[in-house]
Amino acid sequence: MQKYGKTLNDCRIFPIFYKFASKFNRLMKYFETYFTIKAPASLMQDARDILSAIAGEAGFETFEETDDGLKGYVQQMLFEPSLLGQLISNFPIDNVDITYSVAEAEDKDWNEQWEQEGFAPIPIGQQCIVHDGRHFDALPKGKESLDDFDIQIEIDAHLAFGTGTHETTQMMLENLLSLQLEGRKVLDCGCGTGILGIAALKAGAAKCVGYDIDEWSVDNARHNAVINQVDNGYTSLLGDASVLNDVNETFDVVMANINRNILLADMPAFRRKMNQEGILLLSGFYADDMKILSEESATLSLTVIRHTTNGEWACMMLR
């Protein structure tokens, strides 16, 4: 079944949600929404693609195709029904009619099956491989063992974003490992599993500070730093970008793989934590969003020095 956007185990949650979710209930509450699309057969797939993109602006995180449309999931506290209605009323394709119904989704651990199944090893270029510590029977062609890679990252993911399976994580890793990291200080904004900070430390970075609004992610990042034997250089903090007010240092590399709206809101905070010659790595957004992010970065005296794309996703490197 085709899925669009970030899957539930690839999601980030907005800062306002942290105030409620991590304190009172680690099991997120979702709405399950059935979208019915009436469109000519030749337009049906395009309509699905566009609907999944615009519904993401109203808080939706994942979609599954149905025979007559899409099924989408959105955290209850992030759902913006008025915005969704407005976006659908301005749907950019003629001769397409969209209706939808909303119901509470079954309470469940969305990651449980995925965690049990794990994932096949993921090569990042020729020097790095990400694995789950269990599945080693699908190494890339020409590679006989994990030892054929200079950097090996084991990720034990529990309700946290960042295993290397998503295009944005892969682009972030590729761009990060292209930098000279020896002795550098790294800041990971929205650390998820900690994969980016762990990669930096294994590539020679002196220290990494990561933060996330999700308590599961903060704990998981610490756990992964331990199993990768880089915990001496790794610190993970609980909170949104406001935690940076208590971090009394600047960094050589600042990275954030979050959604566009949070990047736009938090970019000034990222900028304040960059060294004079620091690098900012951003992903978690669509290629179409690069223009607005570039414009915002220019107001902060940041210059785009590189950008890459993978499918519909994009990554930007700024100085």
Image (tube, rainbow, N blue to C red):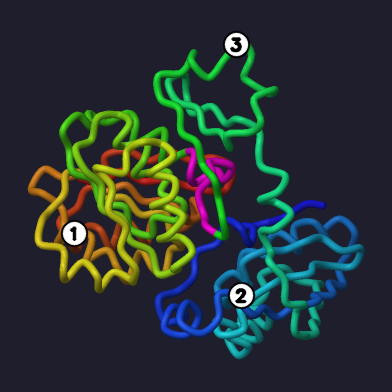
Q: Residues within 10 Å of mark 2 (few under 14, many from 20)?
A: few
In magenta stretch: residue 85: no
Q: Nearer the viewer, residue 229 or 149?
A: 229
Disc 3 packing (10 Å; few <14; some 14–19; many ≥20): few
Location of residue 56 (image quadrant): bottom right
Precedes in sequence: disc 2 or disc 1: 2
State the mark number for residue 271.
1
- Dot 3 falls on a residue whose secondary structure is loop
Residue 84: x %, y % from top left:
63, 82
Q: Give yes or no for residue 168 being in the magenta stretch.
A: yes
Q: Who's the residue at 67% across and 42% down the image?
A: 118
Circle 2 sits on which residue? 27
Q: Is residue 215 above or below residue 18?
A: above
Residue type (three-letter) at the residue carrying disc 2: Leu
Q: Is residue 72 or residue 217 the one in the foreground? A: 217
Image spot of residue 187 (x, y percent) = 25, 51
Main SS of the magenta part reads: loop
Q: Give the magenta part as a residue range.
A: 160-170
Question: Relative to 66, is 113 above or below?
Answer: above
How far apart are the alpha carbons under marks 2 and 1?
A: 33 Å
Q: Is residue 111 left or right of residue 271?
A: right
141 above or below 48? Answer: above
- Give the SS element for disc 1: helix
The front one of 153 and 57 is 153
Q: Earlier in the sequence, mark 2 or mark 3?
A: 2
